[in-house]
Amino acid sequence: MRSISSPTRLTVAVDLAILTVIDGAMRVLLLRRPDDDVPGWAMPGGVVDAERGLDETVQQVLVAKTGVRDAHFEQLATYGAVNRDPRGRVISVAYLALCPHDRLEGAVAAGADQMLAHLHTTWPGEQGGPARLTDAAGQPLSMAFDHADILGDLVRRLRGKLDYSLIAFGLLHRRFTLRDVQTVHEAILGHPLAKPAFRRKLLSRGLLKATGDYAPAGAHRPAELYELLEEK
Amino acid sequence: MRSISSPTRLTVAVDLAILTVIDGAMRVLLLRRPDDDVPGWAMPGGVVDAERGLDETVQQVLVAKTGVRDAHFEQLATYGAVNRDPRGRVISVAYLALCPHDRLEGAVAAGADQMLAHLHTTWPGEQGGPARLTDAAGQPLSMAFDHADILGDLVRRLRGKLDYSLIAFGLLHRRFTLRDVQTVHEAILGHPLAKPAFRRKLLSRGLLKATGDYAPAGAHRPAELYELLEEK
DNA sequence: ATGGATATATCCATTTTGAATATAACACAA
DNA sequence: TTGTGTTATATTCAAAATGGATATATCCAT
């Protein structure tokens, strides 16, 4: 068996969009780049080394930055423009990781060097374009590299897959109300949905099982808790 | 600005699923691996070098292997398991390239070392799993690397995007009949479609313009030729 | 008890879908 | 010229899905 002679080798990194929904708004974990480095905010990431697969590297970064071990993650796309990193050629494989908000809020303290930024789009539906990231005060954040483009691609993909994938449930706890699911859908889509139609379509997917228990509520009727059926 | 000290560098390749539809069947260009190399059939590909972006590399491979310059292509996913190439660590970014069949048949002569293999699935719908590749006689082909898995992912993705993307039109000429579009859809989905419903839904997308010309036909009514409206 | 709030259920008109049938245009042969 | 086979195109109808509005249920606070 012939071995590969002397091929070009490049730096390969994974970048993680660690996503959650808080108070009906998409939030993504961003880290501030060091001062003497590429300026701006960026998604957490790490270089892929020779002994680790892509998924292993993602899991490692996820645990290192958030402490969360069991988040659902999936690959988004790979970005390899020659000048996307001014320090040198880096191929970045972007991943999405989904997490219920309290898991992240517990492990990630907002500070000067990291935050759960608000994630918006300036375009409707699945049109596409860069995302807009803002801080808690609504001020726009300056993004490093092509990370605003990557996050724009992410939102477009989320909107497309929302209705036929289990993405929404990765952002919820094991048990949730139908309203919780609707809130997640509205946060991702960026517009409100009609409640009866949403509920009907969600239940008709045959994915959910009513538990018979009810969420603690305020001065109103409590909502029933559902959970995902395990598919075989 | 700090430069990256001594990060791990890996071989990065692009692999191309060059797809077409011939006589109602999906076909993909495969090359036979050299005898002293990894055995089996594989998609054409090339190593990404430091000065070329991913898309540039794809275009280069496409022209080198087929002579086709204006095929539509898009990224599928990236495969980076540690042992996917027995010769060493290679990160493979898989791409889909779409081509009308006569463009490929003209440039790619079927032979002992390359062929337009038949591409099937053994699973229905968008369930997922490896693809099944066969030669002109229907004999299964032994695939190198993880290329059967990649092609399975490709088919699943195609089936999901077919109804709301322009994928089908990348496999057709500039002018085509509605039946041509249906044939492409049926080839990708792997099952027949009802003609009136297909036609109604296709036209209601508002993508097509009737030309007033008709395709030469045999002993039957000729079909009108349509073309894609240019979107702005 | 009453009212505010939210969950859940029901209803109805409209649109979309699936499936079947009818008509049109062409080539070829009797 | 006329009939027949074949495929394209048009029409029709019932069933299903959808959007929107309204009604009812359950809880807490007053």
Image: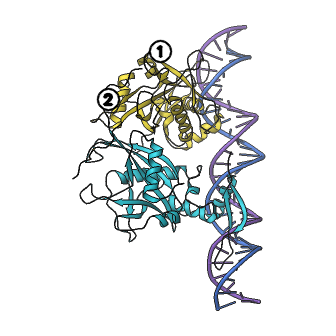
Chain colours: A cyan, B yellow, C purple, D blue
Contact between labelled residues 1 and 2, with CB atoms less than 8 Å apart = no
Q: Could you tell me which secondary element the residue under label 1 belongs to?
A: loop
In this picture, residue A116 sits left or right of residue A215: left
Quarter of the image for residue B18 reads: top left
Q: Position of residue B32 (x, y in %)?
A: 46, 18
User: What residue is shown at x 41% (from left), y 18% (from top)?
Assistant: B107
Tell me the chain of label 1: B
Mark 2 packing: few (<14 Cα in 10 Å), some, or many (20+)? few
Give A226 or B216, whichever is nearer the viewer. Answer: A226
**Image position of A100 with respect to A72: above or below:** below
Q: Tell me the kind of residue under disc 2.
A: Pro
Q: Residue furthest front?
A: A51
Tell me the chain of label 2: A
In this picture, residue A182 sits left or right of residue A53: right
Mark 1 packing: few (<14 Cα in 10 Å), some, or many (20+)? some
Q: Say which mark, if any, is on residue B110.
A: 1
Q: Say which mark, if any, is on residue A7.
A: 2
User: What residue is shown at x 39% (from left), y 51% (from top)?
Assistant: A45
Q: Position of residue A54 (x, y in %)?
A: 45, 43
